[in-house]
Image: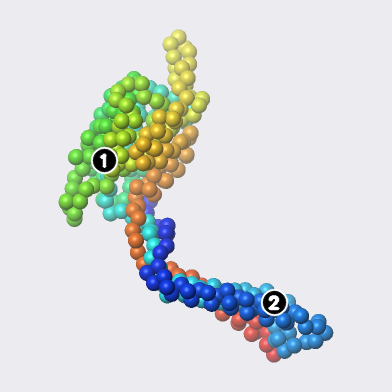
Amino acid sequence: MMMTMSILWEIGFMRPVRLWALLALPVLAVVYLVLIWLKRSKTRRQATNLDILFPRRSAWKRHVAVGAAILSLGSLTLAWAQPNGYVQVPRDRATIFLVIDVSRSMEATDVAPNRLQAAKDAATDFVNNLPKGFNASLVAFSGTASLLVPPTEDRGKITTAIAGLRVGPSTAIGEGIFTALDAISLIPPDPAFPDDPPGVAMVVLSDGASNLGRSSTAAAKQAKADGVAVSTIAFGTKDGYIPGPYGSRQSVPVEAGELKNIADASGGKAYSAGSLGQLREVYDNIAQTVGYEMQETEITARFVGFAVGFGLIAVLGAMSLAARWP
């Protein structure tokens, strides 16, 4: 997946005083409406030259042509004011930490074939679709946390480690976050800008709440202090269960509360997914977030393009009306 789309978020103007010219547009619209009213106020029996040239059935074409012409003038006026805006542009480089829960509850089969295997599949796709130049790192946690792969551009190392994930007892979300934060120092410097701090994002996937280790709230606060937004994914459904003793079932419903608190405290976003398809959609959203950065740029060309488009509509409308002339 190549991420090349730019999305406009805010607009400002380098020459805002020129926007006063927009006042001419409502004046033109009023003049046009007055002319229509004057025309309609005439007796229906009196045929005017305008009626002959432009039959009544073509009125909508006149309205479209005039409206498009006014909009074209408006777009040109906005372009004349030299608009600038913040757009999303692809990042050249960043590091993504994947922090994945491998506690025993991840064996629940409410997500086919089970939560862990579905998490593996989606994480593999996510890593493989990261832009070239991005580093990725993998941390797994159950009762303890382990840095399985330090930050690297080698996608093969990451995907191999993801495929080898195995479950363990207990859940220590805080430990997983702290372990990833400790690994920031291992990020290789950008060859082009070796002195610049690395751009870092973190994704934590889990199905439950912590029952061991350091506080996840403290970890989230440390992440925010380090400038790392933590996106969380609560993965699973309320119907999940794993085998218990003597053939019983142990309920392991997904618990999203702690994960949402982590996202809120760190400045990230909290997501939920109850299927592999939903999980892939979440990863796509995260990829858009971490794969872009906001940059200010002049966007005059956009408004010139709008003006050309509206102008073309106006011209086509006028040509259609002219084709009816005798």
Q: Is residue 320 above or below residue 286?
A: below
Which numbered marker is on residue 59? 2
Question: Which residue is rendered at x = 34% and y = 61% of the image?
Answer: 296
Name the residue nearer the viewer: 178 or 81: 81
Q: Is residue 68 above or below residue 250?
A: below
Q: In the rendered image, which residue does mark 1 sit on?
A: 226
Q: Quadrant of residue 46?
A: bottom right
Q: Position of residue 228 (x, y in %)?
A: 30, 41
Q: Is residue 32 left or right of residue 230?
A: right
Q: Position of residue 263 (x, y in %)?
A: 38, 37
Check disc 2 and give the amino acid type.
Ala
Question: Which residue is rendered at x = 41% and y = 70% of the image?
Answer: 16
Q: Position of residue 30 (x, y in %)?
A: 62, 76
Question: Which residue is rendered at x = 30% and y = 32% of the image?
Answer: 219
Q: Quadrant of residue 235?
A: top left
Check disc 1 and give the amino acid type.
Asp
Point out the residue furthest to the right here: 45
Look at the numbered disc 2 and give the secondary structure of its residue.
helix
Q: Is residue 81 above or below residue 46?
A: above
Q: Is residue 182 left or right of residue 317?
A: left
Real-space Cα distance between discs 1 and 2? 64 Å
Residue 218, can we see it? yes
Name the residue nearer the viewer: 84 or 123: 84
Q: Residues within 10 Å of mark 1 (few under 14, many from 20)?
A: few
Q: Is residue 39 left or right of residue 276?
A: right
Front of the two marks 1 and 2: 1
Question: Which residue is rendered at x = 44% and y = 14% of the image?
Answer: 244
Q: Residues within 10 Å of mark 2 (few under 14, many from 20)?
A: some
Q: Is residue 165 left or right of residue 314?
A: left
Name the residue nearer the viewer: 158 or 47: 47
